[in-house]
Image: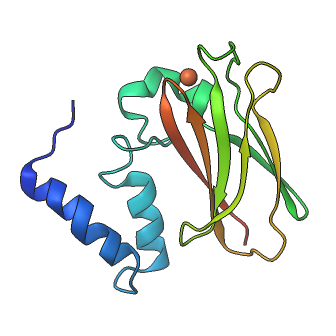
Amino acid sequence: MLNINKRNFLFCCCALPFYYNTNILSSQDKFDYLLKGPLAGSLYYTKKKPGRWKKMLSSHIPVIQRKSNFLEVSTPHEMRGFEHFIIKHTILDKKFNIISEKKFDPSKDRAYSKHNIAGFSETLFVMSVCNLHDTWLEPVRLF
Ligand SMILES: [Fe+2]
């Protein structure tokens, strides 16, 4: 259950996205906010804040390997048809622009994707989405 009152909820929904998209917060503060702030562990899940799915961490957090101008992403998760599967992997830049996405067909795919990241040199974010256990976020620092 979320432990959030109405004031915190309004702050999260209205003010924090504004702060995030301005220069009020440093890059490190934005990074920490995303991975450790109030939305992590509630709207999405991270290694440090797996929230209600903490027993599911190892099978849902995306595993990322950088190979030159490519990111290889896998999620060590079953693909049990449309019953339980990884829906997609999405790569976002530091401003949350989608730069690459791979959707999976659970009848034939495994949860693996390869993304061209040529031209990016800062932090990227990788999302892996499960149809039952929501969205998991993992950063990649390219510098
Ligand atoms: Fe799952």
Q: How is the image coloured?
A: rainbow
* Residue sitting nearer the eye, 16 or 27: 16
Tell me where residue 82 sits by quadrant.
Answer: top right
Tell me if 63 is positioned left or right of 39 in this view: right
Tell me if 67 is positioned left or right of 92 in this view: right
- The location of residue 100, given as percent across then percent down, is 73, 58
Instruction: List the single residue furthest toward the bottom.
Output: 23
Tell me where residue 109 sits by quadrant.
Answer: top right
In the picture, the quarter occupied by the C terminus is bottom right
Tell me if 132 is positioned left or right of 36 in this view: right
Compared to residue 104, the image places residue 10 above or below, namely below
Q: What residue is drawn where x is 43% and y is 35%?
A: 50
For the image, the number of numbered tags is: 0
* Residue sitting nearer the eye, 107 or 60: 107
- The location of residue 5, given as percent across then percent down, is 9, 48
- The location of residue 11, given as percent across then percent down, is 18, 63
Compared to residue 139, the image places residue 18 above or below, namely below
Q: What residue is drawn where x is 54% and y is 27%?
A: 131
Compared to residue 89, the image places residue 55 above or below, namely above
Q: What residue is drawn where x is 40% and y is 87%?
A: 23
**Ligand 1 is located in which of the four quadrants?**
top right
Instruction: List the single residue furthest toward the right.
Output: 68
Compared to residue 79, the image places residue 64 above or below, namely below
Q: What residue is drawn where x is 43% and y is 62%?
A: 32
- The location of residue 139, given as percent across then percent down, is 60, 56
Instruction: List the single residue furthest toward the left.
Output: 6
In the picture, the quarter occupied by the N terminus is top left
